Image (spheres, coloured by chain):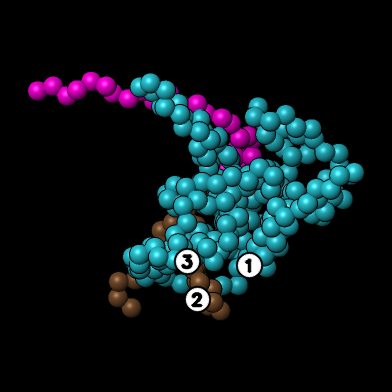
Chain colours: A cyan, B brown
Amino acid sequence: MSDTSKSSSERVTVRKGDVNNIKIEQCDIFRNIVFVESAIVEGNELLLSEIHFPFAICLSQSCDLESDLRDREKGESDTKGNMVLQIILAPLFPVEQFHSGSHWGDLINCEGVNKKVLDNIIKKNRDPRYHYIRFPEEDGIGPFVADFKHFFTMSRDALYGSMKNRICAIKSLYRDDIARRFANYLSRIGLPE
Amino acid sequence: MSDDMEVQNFVDIIVDPATEQIQMPNAVPEDYVLEDYTKRPRRVLRRIKFSTESPTD
């Protein structure tokens, strides 16, 4: 496997037991995420509505994800309620799609943003609703725009079952920034004009 | 070191020596294709029928 990592971390072989320590971290980026929008039983049929997101970012707190995994691995009874049922995610859109307004496809009609807004507001993270994520060019992914407004949750077990779809993690400094901005967006207060 | 194995995964698993946390670097999967950028979110509706027939001998 070619070494494309620019991380300063050292690559080591991993003991078999450590493979089970692979855990989802806050701001891990996934592709091909299937979100179950609704499941309705009608007679002898189950009507399942899914939304397939090409890209999504995990926004659940790392401490919650860690304590969930720790308690499950230890097999402790869930007396402290640390096991999570659902993980928070938000859709990620390639910036070109977001610029043109075509990023939601047929699901939601959107207008594009002009270049001035894109460069001065979105890309500088001055709009609380969005977060612009840019990767080093050599990584070959992104850049993306996360839309905090349309966060959703997904079954914890289902997301762990989709680990093969995890693209990458984000370094801790940038994770903190994304987490803080998401929290700020959710805690905004709308005032009458 | 016995029982070590190099993890064969679509992304290399590495350990941060500072924190001893297993991390995923910003390395893309080998099968990552640029076509992903043309995809948009889409709704998929599925209709699943329950079997109401009783098993027969």
Residue labelled with disc 2:
B20
The label nearer to you, 1 versus 3, is: 3
Q: Nearer the viewer, residue A27 or A183?
A: A183
Res A67 label: 3
Q: Secondary structure at mark 2?
A: loop
* Residue A80, picture quadrant: bottom left
Q: Nearer the viewer, residue A29 or B52?
A: B52
Q: Which residues are magenta?
A: B33-57
State the separation of the CA atoms marked 2 and 3: 17 Å
Q: Residue at x 45, y 29 (%)?
A: A40
Q: Residues within 10 Å of mark 1 (few under 14, many from 20)?
A: few
Res B32 visible: no
Q: Secondary structure at mark 1?
A: helix
- Compared with A96, A26 (above or below) is below
Residue labelled with disc 1:
A172
Q: Residue at x 42, y 70 (%)?
A: A13
Q: Which of pointers 1 and 3 lies earlier in the amino acid sequence?
A: 3
